[in-house]
Image: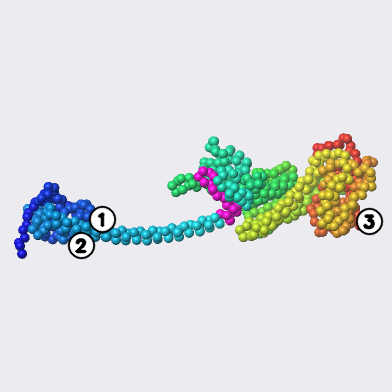
Amino acid sequence: MEPTRASVIPIHSVTPVAGPDRRWCGYVRLPGRDDQTHVLILQRGKRLFGIPALCPHDGSRMDRCRSDEDGNLVCGAHGLKVPVESNTEGFEVVDQDGRFYMQQSATTASLGDQNEMVGLRQELAALREANFVLEAQISTISEVMDGVIAELSEKSQQLERRSHEQGRLGRFIDNVINSMENLMIVLDAHGRIQQINAAVTRQLGFRSEDVVGRPSDALLSAQSLACLAETTRTSNVPEGLSLFRTILDRGELAFETTLAHASGKGSDRHFIMRGTPLYERSGKLEGAVVVASDITLLRAREHELQQSEQRFRDFSAVSSDGFWEVDENLRFVRPAFGREDLIGVSLFSIARSNGQDQAAATASIERAVSRHEEFRDLEFQLPAPVEAWDWLSLSGRPVFDPAGRLTGYRGTIKNITTRKQAQRELQMHRDHLADLVASQTADLLAAKEQAERANQAKSEFLANMSHEFRTPLHGIGSFAKLGLTRVETSPREKLRSYFESILKSGNRLGELVDDLLDLAKLEARRTRLQRKACDMRDLVDVIARDLHALTDSRRVTLRVVSDTADTCADLDEQQFHTVIQNLVANAVKFSPPKGEITITLSDGELPLARPALCMSVRDRGVGVPQEELESIFDKFVQSSKTKTGAGGTGLGLAITREIVLLHEGWISAGNHRDGGAIFTVLVPRRTDPVSVNEDLGT
């Protein structure tokens, strides 16, 4: 073999390259070439080996490319391998005292050889290498694309599942929103209606296509807009956006109002409207949501309860007796007999501390309280008289909470000052005027009996009143409690029956209070009569028509007989309408089925030969016992034959008598010889000019 010949070519500008293995970069000028070649020197064991520093594939620098486990370089630009020791352009490098030289043998193709054959071989090798690189790139890209496609497919499936879940969740939310009883309106970022729920359509008649896209004020009534105009701080609010701008200004909104109706007539329902702005996570305004709760029934019930309470207070204010209430420590929680200063004061402080009777009454209350029992008619004398209150009679009963714990006492106070004064005067006469006892015994007994009758009448009146009040009040309380405890579980029809029972009891209580107030005004002579010539036959015909349904339901015939050509008298038409209605309605109640009621108008005469018009009302009922013909005109008194038959409060005849007496007339009750009761009323045909339109209360 021919010995190898080598040439030594110096490598200039050699600099070390930072990296995990030892490398140097430098430049060499090859024979036959004018330019310098950039070479890379690598250490392999104890050998130094050099290759061109530029990638043969794309010309990128490889001085910092990593080495694989076989010692080949991996191009950082495209990831392809570049051989080092097997490189056709590789060469041996020697290091002599820090200077590097390139050794080029005769059997190795020179880097600077311009021979055409060498060039073709190099081009062929480059093409093969490029083809290999291209195939590797295509394979790598194919693998990458498969991975990308698989990843996209998985993400697509995830998106599809998420879209399906969001759709299901959206439908669920829509169903929940549309099943709400409250109205819900969603506004967009421009204050226009974006969505409404089914409650808006049910209660206001607006469909979604009617209001979506319209300004926020489309569902508001004129009252709502006026209220918002007064409270909105921002001036120059765009038309139709008062609600939206108010929500944004305040951050939230809550007010009571009425709403518009699709019919254009407005809605009589009352709502509590609440609005809240909606923001994205970034803080950008997204719109607002408005919820309206129907409180119509609540307001109606509240109004009825307020009226009922006011009537009860009015009645208490005009009553001659009083009411009291204490807590579990027997301290007043409300004024008693007009004394506001008693609130928070002990019940026992209202009694004088001296006297055996006072001590006995106090001891009786203490015993009753310790046993949680009621007490009645315990008499006290106040430390100092208060507006005609000196002596009083106290009655009370315990009040318990639902758990059975005592929460206090409440009861009534009777003013017995008059009776005590009478008793004191009687005692004084007995002690100091023995010589006048005989002559004044009759007067004193009469006064005592009158006082006792008055006290008994008051007791009966209060007992009847308490009973009549307690029944509707108990009904209101019971059904309200039932409704409150079962509002979440009972069906709507059941709740409706509770409210109907509350309304019925409230109306009953209202009628009773109205009757009591009317009777109180009549007895106090505070009623001003507007008397004029009035045809009583016309009044009877009007009432016959008004009571037509009642007479038909009881199958009773109403017959009117005129035994006089002149059926006119001087009457207050409104007040006397009450007289005739009470008498006829009373007769209908006590008439048997298929019975007949006869109303007769005839001539009559009052004392002092005053001409009068006589009206009699006769029924075919059970009649009135002879001993009760006068007492049935008293308050809360009913005939013993009818008190369990037809009901009533016992105030109708008392009111009737007071109205007749105000007309300077007369009324009486009797029994017809052929059976049934007959009531006769006499009223003057002409009024004394002095008494016309007189205020009988002064």
* Magenta stretch holds residue 72: no
Q: What amino acid is at disc 2?
A: Glu
Q: Residue 506: percent from the left, percent from the top? A: 71, 52
Q: Is residue 696 left or right of residue 88?
A: right
State which tag comes first along the sequence, 3 or 1. Answer: 1
Residue projecting furthest to the front: 116
- Residue 69 bears which disc, if any? 2
Name the outermost residue toward the top.
690
Mark 1 against mark 2, which lies toward the viewer? 1
Q: Nearer the viewer, mark 3 or mark 1?
A: 1
Q: Nearer the viewer, residue 47 or 414?
A: 47
Q: Is residue 163 above or below residue 241?
A: below
* Foreground: disc 2 or disc 3: 2
Give the secondary structure at mark 3. loop
Nearer-the-camera pick, 372 or 49: 49
Residue density around tag 1, few if under 14, some if 14–19, many if 20 or more, within 10 Å: few
Q: In the rendered image, which residue does mark 1 sit on?
A: 78
Crowd band around label 3 with a 10 angstrom C-alpha radius: few (<14), some (14–19), many (20+)? few
